[in-house]
Amino acid sequence: MKLLLSLVILFLVGLINCQPETFQFFSQIKEETYYGVYSLSNGNITLSTTNAAPDLQVLGFLPKNGSSNDIMTVCQNPSNLQINTYSTSDNSFTTELTFSPNYKYNFVKQEYVFDSAYRILYIPGSVPLNGENYLALLQWRFGPSVRPLVFAKENILKSTYLYLYLYLFRPPIILGQGYIPNSNVPINPVGAYDAPNQDYYIYYTIGTSAAILKFNFVLDNYAILPLDIEPTPLNGVEQIFFYQGQLIYCRIDKGVGVTIAQIELSGPVTNVYKDTDTDKQFNIDIQPFVFDQTTGTITILNSADDTLYLDVFYITTLKVTSFTNPNSIPSGTFVITALYN
């Protein structure tokens, strides 16, 4: 299967700046879901109550829809997954597409890859099969879609549009060698997407081994690239990001600190930043890493009492700018991205 995908990473935006100036986020407080805007310059915040049902959970942002005020989001409720638009004009969600997976799966919040042409959302995760838990690339096709079919007969190319119902259900792509013989122990891989080359880099650990799995959408195949590290148990959050040919690994351990490293494929993992400042507490009660493709930055967020510590890590220079603001982002907010108007 050869897919010529026009894939887009979540959080990809289009202006050039030194660092993000504003964040947007969704936060659920009790049974209310709020949309918020946070200024990095002074810590000011605006919160708007949305019309989200109490059982709707916002999982992440999709790219902004042109100049519209509508925001595309990935959401879920107990019965299905949804692609919704959120209108900042009237603070309302509208369901655009839905999908109900018929298999069990696990994944952690991270960047998603969305093929808008075929309405397919990709995310690395794991699926339990026959008592074992397998590393997988989850692929969810939202709603019916028409896919072009091109074939040759007697040297004459013909094309037609058919409803290919087979494509409405896309099973997870099992990624081999990544399993734990216990379906109650999830594998929590994290991924980063290289759009020009259509490569999806997936970082995962199993036991005392760590590896990058490189999945190519054009060739529809993958390679497993072992890493020269021995992973330590994680009590926190880890993410990877891809920027201008670099794979960056970010990790925060609760109550301990933050580590950022550069990953060389089939080679070493080199620590380039470490922060164990006890004033920051490292509570992980809000999203700790906000990657901005436009500015090539990773903003590290640590809330401690009334203070929000912000450390902006510049990927190209490995430099960090640090400052503090009032701690006004609600605790439990784990859907944050940069906002550009």
Image: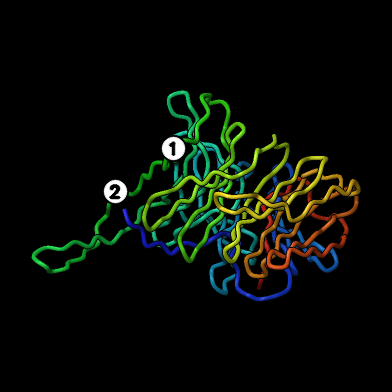
Local crowd size for mark 2, using a 10 Å CA cut-off: few (<14), some (14–19), many (≥20): few
**Drawn side of residue 81 relative to residue 297, left or right:** left
Residue 171 placement (x, y as % from top left) = 39, 41
Instruction: Report the quarter where the C terminus lies.
Output: bottom right
Give the alpha-carbon distance from disc 2 to disc 1, as whole Å: 27 Å
Of helix, strand and loop, which one carries label 2?
helix
Residue at image coords 83%, 40%? 255
Answer above or below: position of 133 versus 261: above
Residue 176: which numbered mark, if any? 1
Residue 26 placement (x, y as % from top left) = 68, 54
Residue 61 placement (x, y as % from top left) = 59, 57
Residue 142 placement (x, y as % from top left) = 43, 51
**Drawn side of residue 341 relative to residue 216, left or right:** right
Of helix, strand and loop, which one carries label 1?
strand
- Locate residue 188: give its quadrant: top right
Local crowd size for mark 1, using a 10 Å CA cut-off: few (<14), some (14–19), many (≥20): few
The amino acid type of the residue labelled 2 equals Tyr
Residue at image coords 45%, 60%? 198
Q: Nearer the viewer, mark 2 or mark 1?
A: 1
Residue hosting label 2:
165
- For marks 2 and 1 on the same chain, the one whose residue lies earlier in the sequence: 2
Answer above or below: position of 249 versus 295: above
Residue at image coords 54%, 37%? 106
Q: For the residues labelled 2 and 1, say whether their Cβ atoms are less than 8 Å apart.
A: no
Of 160 and 88, nearer the camera is: 160
